[in-house]
Image (spheres, rainbow, N blue to C red):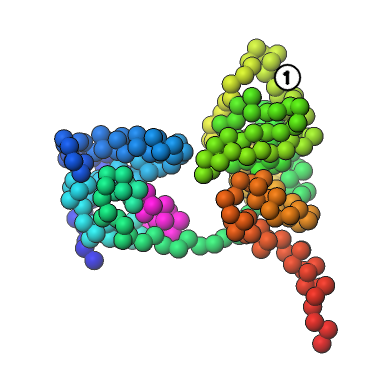
Amino acid sequence: MASSAPLPRSAALGRRPRGPRFGPPTGPTFSVTDLVERFQTMLQAQERSPCTVKQYGHIARTFLAFARKPLDAVTSSDLEAFREYLVLQRRYSKNSLYTTIRGLACLFRSFGLTTADSLEPPRRPERLPRYLNEEEMHRLLEATKGSARDSAIVHVLAFGGLRVSELCHLLVEDIEFERNILHVRSGKGDKDREVVLEDRTRAAIDRYLTERRLAGDVGGRLFPVGPVTVERVVRRGAADAGLARRVTPHMLRHTLATTLLSRGCDIRYIQRLLGHASVATTQIYTHVDTQALRDAYQRAKPQY
């Protein structure tokens, strides 16, 4: 396997190197900044999520700082050396390495190159999702009641199963008040879906929107906040609720799916609610529901 020369400090930290210029496969010479910006523009034209555009741009910038050569001059040995560097020096996990290799493959394909096609991503470990039990979830909901906005955010996450990016992109007009339906537009995989607003979630949203109207704030995004703010709302609520472990917004999505399954909801409806492309993705929650497994075993265990 090819080895790389020692990295300059700017490259080791993932910052843009100064001086060297990299050319795209064809056309005039571009700097690293120009090439990465062109790559990100291509991703935006493909309607990739803002998170993917930012993440893949960082991957491209880090790799180009490592390679120090034009993109069309990169060899498979250069890619293997970069992979070795990430594993041995940067201590990348399998999940991080998987994302990086996917990003590199996309980078080279975007410029009509097949160099990265043979670079195989590692198999990601299949971990069971972390979730709250119903008593913990009740405490979290109670702890956020002091803020109309925070309460509405946690209710939508807890009862709607939305991803953080989906919640941050909701518009007020996405609420269909007559049918108590929330329209999730362009979710993961660019798919739209409908989520039922149960009574407590509808009440939390009504309270929040009433406060906004009184302040003269109407229309636009339902929650004009970013993912970091949503993370902070959930983390602060968990602390106020006395939950010792780290709680994330995505845990509330897992909690909803696990609770619905344990209460007998058909897995196909859970798949539709969460916006999973395949029921195989939803089936991971069957491994979490150990009580259902115990009940099924008790009913069917052999009588030796």
Q: Where is residue 77 in the image (x, y as percent from the top left)?
A: 22, 60
Q: Is residue 178 above or below residue 232?
A: above
Q: Which one is nearer the viewer's eye here, 120 or 14? A: 120
Q: With 155 as the anchor, is 91 left or right in this view?
A: left
Label 1 residue SS = helix
Q: Is residue 109 covered in magenta?
A: no
Majority secondary structure of the magenta segment?
Answer: helix
Image position of 73 with respect to 88: above or below:
above
Which residue sits at x=39%, y=60%? 121
Instruction: Assign the N terminus to one quadrant of the image.
Output: bottom left
Instruction: Between residue 236 and residue 296, name the one nearer to us.
Output: 296
Q: Would you say 134 lies left or right of 72 here?
A: right
Residue type of the residue flagged with mark 1: Thr
The residue at 62%/56% (across/down) is 279
Res. 40 visible in picture: no
x then y, percent, for residue 143: 73, 37
Q: Position of residue 162 (x, y in %)?
A: 63, 41
Q: Quadrant of residue 20?
A: top left
Q: In this view, does 160 lie above or below 301?
A: above
Q: Residues within 10 Å of mark 1 (few under 14, many from 20)?
A: some
Give the residue at mark 1.
210
Q: In which quarter of the image is the C terminus?
A: bottom right
Please say whether residue 127 is visible from this viewpoint: yes
Q: Which residue is drawn at 35% across and 42% down?
A: 58
Which portion, as a residue range, is magenta? 90-103
In which quarter of the view is residue 266 placed?
bottom right
Q: Is residue 145 above or below residue 292?
A: above
- Residue at the (38%, 43%) spot, across then down: 56
Q: In which quarter of the image is residue 258?
A: bottom right
